[in-house]
Amino acid sequence: MSAFRFIFRIFIISSLALAPCLFGISSAHAQTDEDILREAALSPPGANLPDCKPSEEHPYPVILVPGTFESMAFNWSKLSPLLAKKGYCVYALNYGITHLGFSTGPIEKSAIELKAFVDQVLEQTGAEKVSIVGHSQGGMMPRYYIKYLGGAEKVEDLIGLAPSNHGTIGVLGIEPIMILPGLLGCTACDQQKAGSDFLNDLNAGDETPGDVSYTVISTKYDEIVVPYTSAFLDGPEEQVSNITIQDQVPADLAAHLGIAFDSHAYEFVYDALEHDGPANFARAEQKWLQKNGN
């Protein structure tokens, strides 16, 4: 799927989901749109269960943070139930909702929403910290929470799937009006351009503050975060791991959206969650080989 088709598809899905709520459409067709909105607002399977309590084996609840234009229901429909099956308490949220769709508002405000959600999860579960898994903007935005809003004391792991840590010169790096007139006003899109004031501030000084373990999982075929290496973070090896899934499986063709549904990428997510520190490439690769009989 081309970068333009990807952004167009996600924008249309997001817009359909929000239109009835924002514009008060009332018709037989609007009822279908309301169904879409309702489904998008639903938690992904296995997430946001009110009675879940962390175990000794998995003491940190896992919070799933979707990307720009994406809902939690769609973005985490595959990973959420897999994590729940492994025994994790899984939580997910939608954030930054504007007339353009999910995760399109100012990233600073989205980070405030994340802060409130983390505090709610900690209070509900009694856990001391959470682990965060985010896709695209959802892998970058929590860094603002960690750096400026006290998250460094409350986050054990931040695991980003194709996170926009240093922005993009790709489709989000083009003036939104040139991609699709309806994208005009997408603050989060503007803030994810390489060299934006927001990203310059976020990446100034220590890119990986606190005792948080940072894992970045990228794909060479990312058509949104361009170049794909802009996802990588600078930091000490014991705290930061920058991984490209094709280094493990060269034939894996997952692109920006696909990495959120990619079983090879998940091996690194699991490794980071199951061990102290960030994901370890060799350890995760060995486990993957054992599972696949090699």
Image (cartoon, grey):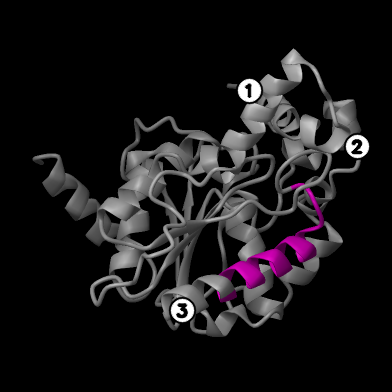
Amino acid beneath label 3: Lys
**Circle 2 or circle 3, nearest the eye:** 3
Mark seen at residue 129 = 3
Q: Secondary structure at mark 2?
A: loop
Position of residue 5 measured from the top left corner of the image (x, y, whole percent)? 67, 22
Classify residue 249 by image quadrant: top left
Q: Is residue 3 left or right of residue 253?
A: right
Position of residue 190 measured from the top left corner of the image (x, y, whole percent)? 83, 48
The reply to whether residue 274 is visible in this rendering is: yes
Q: Secondary structure at mark 3?
A: loop
Residue ranking furthest to the top: 28
**Circle 1 or circle 3, nearest the eye:** 3
Q: Which residue is mark 1?
A: 2
Q: Residue at x 63, y 59 (%)?
A: 140
Amino acid beneath label 2: Leu
Q: Secondary structure at mark 1?
A: loop
Q: CA distance from mark 1 to mark 3?
A: 38 Å
State which tag comes first along the sequence, 2 or 3: 3
Q: CA distance from mark 1 to mark 2?
A: 21 Å
Q: Which residue is mark 2?
A: 184
Q: Is residue 113 above or below residue 36?
A: below
Q: Is residue 273 above or below residue 268?
A: below
Position of residue 244 measured from the top left corner of the image (x, y, whole percent)? 43, 48
